[in-house]
Amino acid sequence: MTDPCDDQPTRKVRLLLAEDQSMVREALAALLGLEPDLEVVAQAARGDEVVAAAREQPVDVALLDIEMPGISGLDAAALLRAEFPKLKVVILTTFGRPGYLRRAMECGADAFLVKDAPAAQLADAVRRVLRGERVIDPALAAAALADGANPLTDRECDVLRAAADGSTNAEIAAALQLSQGTVRNYLSTAIQKTGARNRAEAVRTAGDKGWL
């Protein structure tokens, strides 16, 4: 005798896709929708919309771009991990920066892939993280090992981020509630650690390596 449950379709994996470029987001959603076991049920165009989207529509896996308005995909990943500990997180990036990989792992991401990877590879990564695996682009993993750890402290990163728009020491000090002397010391140390000649170059170097 046949069990009627055998005829019931398997529930599709429910995906949240966060990407600020609408054409890229729609293309990814369409490609993932072609997979028989995957379904994009929620989308977000900003990093600060991700958690709300996950609250409104229960999902199994969140696919997050790194560079989005509001907050970054890395910050969104940390918030998702705190509120939805069982939710799997896949970080997608255009820029294969080793520092981004390290930060993604610190945020609790389950996978880290470049966006130009084939759709089939992304779909496979979704299935693998649901099996409990951690999936990392091999070239990025090798680059992260070769590049070494981020030498900057959290506060040095804060000061460099604040300096990125050309703010003066006084403006940075006011924004971060530090003295101007402390800001000068952090900037000087950050310049030395990045091997830069000035603060602007230190910001560029740290950004290029994914440390900020």
Image (spheres, rainbow, N blue to C red):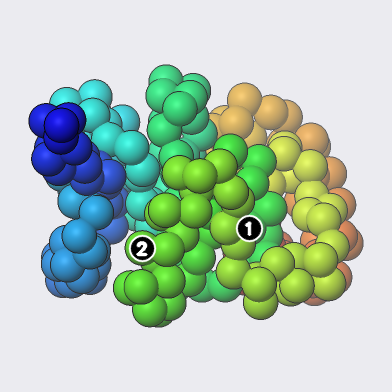
**Could you say where residue 169 lies in the image, as x and y percent from the top left?**
65, 45
Q: Amino acid at mark 2?
A: Ala
Observer-nearest of 191 and 24: 24
C-alpha span from label 2 to label 1: 20 Å
**Residue 88 position in % (x across, y down):** 44, 40
> In percent of the image, x 27 and y 45: which residue is there?
13
In the image as oriented, which residue stretches furthest toward the front? 1
Looking at the image, residue 152 sits to the left or right of residue 1; the answer is right
The residue indicated by pointer 1 is 101
What amino acid is found at the position of numbered circle 1 in the picture?
Answer: Leu
Residue 96: percent from the left, percent from the top? 57, 72
Tally of numbered discs: 2
The residue beneath circle 2 is 123
Nearest the viewer among 73 and 90 is 90
**x, y (%) of residue 194?**
81, 65
Q: Is residue 20 above or below residue 80?
A: below
Q: Secondary structure at mark 2?
A: helix
In the visual, does 122 lie left or right of 19? right
Residue at 66% across, 41% down: 106
> Quick one: 154 or 52, which is closer to the camera?
52
Quadrant of the rendered image containing residue 144: bottom right
Q: Nearer the viewer, mark 2 or mark 1?
A: 2
Instruction: Categorize mark 1 by other alpha carbons within 10 Å: few (<14), some (14-19), many (20+).
Output: many
Mark 2 / mark 1, whichever is N-terminal: 1
The answer to whether residue 33 shows anywhere in this view is: yes
Residue 210 in view here:
no
Residue drawn at point x = 66 percent, y = 77 percent: 139
Vertical side of 55 occupied by 159: above or below = below
